[in-house]
Amino acid sequence: MDAPSEGVEEALEVVAGFDEALTHGFARLAGDQLRDLAGALASTPLGQRAAEAAEKIAAGSVAEEHLTVLAGGRAALLGAVHDALLSQLDTAMGRRRAEYVAGEGRSAAGAGCRSWLAELAITGWKGVDHDLVSASAQPIEALLADPGMRRLAVLLDGLAAELSASCPVATMERLPRRRWADLWTRALLLSQGGWPEPAVEEVSGTLLILGVDVQEHGTAVQVQVHGVLDERLVRTSVTVAKVDTIVGLAVWPLLSGYPKLVRALAEQRAVEVRDLPLLGGGDLVWHEDRVMLKDPVDPFVTARVALAGAVAPAVPPLERHPVRIAEPVLVEGDLSGYAFDRLTPSGPITEDVLKGASACVGLMRWDGGQWTLQPLAVQKGKKKPHNAELALSPKAAKAGEAVTVLKERAGRLLRK
C-alpha cells in the first residue's frame, strides 16, 4: 500500500497542469498544458479528438465541443488513477468487486448551462467576478424547474455559490483549483446527457451496520451509513438542509425525520430491510417505512465475521475519481502507523481517543498523495466509541435547542 501505483503521479501531474490552465483561462496561453493532456490520451479512443481540441483552443478557437472532449479526457485520467488505486486496495485486502451494470434509462441533457461553463473556462477562475457568476442564474433556474435535471442543477448552484462567495477570485491567496476543476468537469459532462441511469434492484435482508460518516457542509448535513447486507457491501445516505451556525452535535436533531435510522446508528442495531431499492453503485435508498430495528450488533464483530467475505459494489463511470474512494476496513493492533483523517465533530472520536486504541473500523481513503484512515468506530480497552454514539444523548438534544429556536423565528417571519 505504501508504494504508489505505476503512472499515478504522472497522471496527476497532467491533471494539475490542466487545472492550472483553467485557473488562468483558456483565452490566455494554455497550449502546453492542454497538449500534455492530449498526449496522455494519445493511445486511447479520445486521443485524436483531444489532440485536435488542444490545438484549436491553443490557436484561440474555443468551442463547446472542444471543451467537452478535454473535460472527458481529464475525467478519464482521474478515472484511471482511481482504478489503479482501488485495484491496489482490493488486492491488499483480497476484496472481490462486482461488475458494473448500467440501467436502460438515459439522462437528459442540459444545453442551457454549457455556454456559462464555456465562459468560465475561457475567463479562468482568476477572472471570475459577480457579473460572470450572476450569468448562471437563468440557466440554473431553468434546470431546477425540471426534476430530471435536478442533479446537474444542484451541482451548478453549489459551484456558483462558491464562486460568488469568493469574488473577486483574483484577490484570493489560495484557490481550490482541483475542487473547482472537478465541479466544472462533472457539470460539463452531465450537461451532455446520454448517461445510463444506474441499474436498480429491490433487496431484502438484514443490514449489519459498520459505521457512519457524518458529512457537514454550510447548508446541509449528510449521514452516509456503511454496512453489510447479505454478503454485499452497501451504503445508505440521507441528507437534510441546515444553516452554517448548526454544527457538531446540533446536527443530530435535524435528522428527526429519520428516527429509525438515527436509533439504529446510536444503538448500533441491525436493521431488517424490506424491498429497498439498491442502485448499481452500491447505494441503498432508505425508506423508514420499509425497515425494522433488530438487536444490537457489535460493529467489530460484523467487521471480523462479515467484512472479509463481502463483495464490494462496482463504481459507476462518473464516480471514478480518487476522492470518492471510501472503503470499509478493520484495522487491529498497532494503529500508530496510520494517517488518520476526517474526524467527525459530531462524535466522540478525537485524536486523544485514537492514542492507544487497539482496533478501528474505518474508511480507507486516498487524499493528498497518501492513504488515510477515517475512523468510524474505535476499540480502546473496554470502550468502543463510535461516530453516532451521542446522536440521542442529552448533549445532542441540548445542542439542538438552537434548531428549535431557528424554526420558531422562521415561522414568525413566514406568518408576517
Image (cartoon, rainbow, N blue to C red):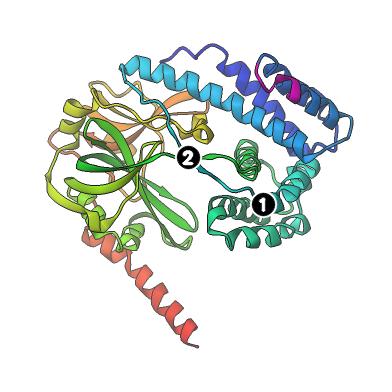
Q: Residue at x 18, y 26 (%)?
A: 304
Q: Is residue 224 visible?
A: no
Q: Which residue is mark 1?
A: 163
Q: Is residue 269 left or right of residue 183?
A: left
Q: Which mark is residue 104?
A: 2
Residue occupying image coordinates x 16% and y 27%: 305
The furthest residue to the left: 295
Point out residue 219 in the picture as x, y percentages from the top left corner: 49, 58
Q: What mark, if any, has residue 221 been given in the picture?
A: none
Which picture quadrant has residue 303? top left
85 or 105, nearer to the observer: 105
Query: Is label 2 in a helix, a strand or a loop?
Result: strand
Residue type marked 2: Glu
State how far apart marks 1 and 2 are (Cα).
36 Å
Q: Which residues are magenta?
A: 44-50
Q: Which amino acid is tagged 1?
A: Leu
